[in-house]
Each structure stands twice: as C-alpha cells, then as structure tokens.
Amino acid sequence: MASNVNPVYGNYHGYYSKRPFVRDSRLSLLPPGFFTGKTVLDIGCNEGWVTCEVGQIWGAQCAVGVDIDDTLIRAAWKRRRSLWSQQSPGLGALEEIQCQHPSAVAPKRAKLHDVLDHDYFPASCEHSYGPLPIPSNRTGVALFPHNVTFRTMDWMTEQDTGDEIRYDIVLALSITKWIHLNHGDNGIKTFFQKIHRNLTSGGTLVLEPQAWETYSKARRMDERLRSNAKHLQLRPGDFHRVLGDIGFGPPTRLGSVGEGGFRRPVDLYVKV
Ligand SMILES: C[S@@+](CC[C@H](N)C(=O)[O-])C[C@H]1O[C@@H](n2cnc3c(N)ncnc32)[C@H](O)[C@@H]1O
C-alpha cells in the first residue's frame, strides 16, 4: 500500500532522522499522567516512534499505531523490538516476581517507567547480535512491548463496523495536511468525525495541525494534490470550528514546539 515514489500521504521514510528525538517534545507538553492506564490510537504513526514512547515511557495501557504505508509499519515493529532490546530487564524481572508471588505488592506502572534504563543493552550489541527476543506475556498485564501494536490501514477508507474499540486518547500529529490535500474539505471533516466516533465519552484528541503556508510545497508533489488544493475552502484555522460542530469542546493550546518548519501548535480537544 502507499507508493513511496512521492510521499503524497506524508509517508516520509526516515522522517525521524529529520525530526530526531529521545523524548518527543510534543508529548512532553502533555500533563503528567496523561497517558497512564489509557488506551491510545496514533493515526499516521509513521515509523512508530511516538506510539512506542507512549507505551514504553508514558504508561499507556495500550497504544495502537496505524499508517497507510506498510513499509513504515514494518519499520515501526522493528523500532518496538529495538527499544525492547535496549531496555533494562528490571521490569521483566519484576513481572516474574509478581507472577510467582501474586500477593507481592504491585509496583505502580508510572514508577516502573521512571526507573527503567532504556539503554541497558547498547544498540551496538543489537547490530552485532540482533535484537533480543520478546518473551511471551505470561502475566496478562500488558506492559511494553506487549502493549504496543501496529497496523497498516488507510484510516480514511477503512469502514467503521460499529463495534470498534473506543480509545481514551487519539493522536493526530502532523497528519491533517495530508488528509486535507488528499481528501478535500469533506475528507478532513470525515476524518474528525471518525475520530469522534472512535473516542470514549470524555476522550481526548491531541491535534498538531500543519499551517496553511506549508500546503503549497506539499501540493507541488503531485498533480492530484495540486488539483484538490484548488478546491479547498477550509483552512487549518477553521478546524476548531469544525471540531466544535462535530461535538468537541473548545481547544486547549498546550504550546508550540519543534525546530524550524516543524514548529507547530499542539491542541487538546475533549469529546463532550
Ligand atoms: C508527516 S507524518 C507524521 C508522523 C507522526 N504522526 C508524527 O507526527 O511524528 C504523516 C503520516 O501519516 C500517514 N498517513 C497519511 N494519510 C494516512 C491515512 N489515510 N491513513 C493512515 N495513515 C496516513 C503517513 O503515511 C505518514 O506516516
């Protein structure tokens, strides 16, 4: 799925080498405990760096990353395995103890993530010997990497069946431009409506929209995008109104982070 000749969906390969991070600065804008114990959907997860961070560091109960580009999803699974490989075995050992002695006091998830050493098994070892195997999850408690999964899908065309999992949090980071250019004004409305349906009541959309000025470069990539762009009436500045009409509360702007062209606002919308 999704040709990589021209990344017309924003399906950049090596995206995170242009936007590298150890901890994603957008996530660090969110309040402490925001993801703890929550179910999270990351739409347009690319190579899964953010999805993995949410599951490994921020204590999500489950984090699902979806992307239209199968090559990116394969890279995301690889990322998950590498991060697991480099992680200190401390957490696994604690799980083991809990399994053998169920009466032992369960350590708090957030605390565990605070003490984890994420570079325990150096990346150079992985290069030489391959990643460590992921053991099966014997505890039934889905901790990283078991709480992180990925799926190739076109979020726009995959039909709702009505019995989807509803998520506590949906991440839509740096994806609206691509949905808007590929699917037009109606498409971006459909995108937001589908997010609304897929959220639990009181659930939160974390939105990082790209600025209108950045559309001009993107649409030059492809004749179809160029033609679609001519018909766009909505602007990213209108999204808060569209989201309000769909059933979200007013946005909370957390701030703007990122370097150069990646400096974008991050807004929270709660499903009312
Ligand atoms: C610019 S990247 C942003 C990656 C990531 N969300 C972040 O901000 O770090 C946009 C991603 O959205 C994906 N994407 C675009 N349209 C999509 C669709 N209809 N369904 C699923 N993924 C899509 C692209 O393949 C690409 O990986």
Image (cartoon, grey):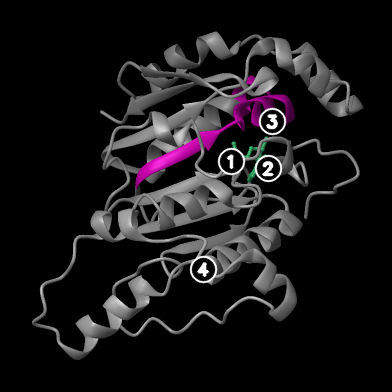
Q: Are marks 2 and 4 in contact (CB under 8 Å)?
A: no
The disc, 3 or 1, on the residue closer to the chain's N-terminal end is: 1
Residue behind label 2 places its C-beta within 8 angstroms of ligand 1? yes
Kindly state the secondary structure of the residue where label 2 is placed.
helix
Spatial CA span between label 2 and label 1: 8 Å
Q: Is residue 106 above or below residue 67?
A: below
Kind of residue indicated by mark 1: Phe
Spatial CA span between label 3 and label 4: 31 Å
The disc, 2 or 1, on the residue closer to the chain's N-terminal end is: 2
Q: What residue is shown at x 68% (from left), y 18% (from top)?
A: 260
Horizontal arrangement in the rendering, residue 37 relative to residue 152 (left or right) = left
Residue behind label 1 places its C-beta within 8 angstroms of ligand 1? no
Spatial CA span between label 2 and label 4: 18 Å
Location of mark 3 (residue): 178
Spatial CA span between label 4 and label 1: 17 Å
Kind of residue indicated by mark 2: Tyr
Nearest to the eye among marks 3 and 1: give it.
1
Q: Nearer the viewer, residue 235 or 150?
A: 150
Q: Is residue 159 above or below residue 184?
A: below
Q: Which residues are magenta?
A: 168-187
Dot 3: within a 10 Å radius of its alpha carbon, few (fewer than 14), some, or many (20 or more) residues?
Answer: many
Location of mark 1 (residue): 21
Horizontal arrangement in the rendering, residue 15 relative to residue 265 (left or right) = right
Please provide percent x and percent y for residue 124: 69, 67
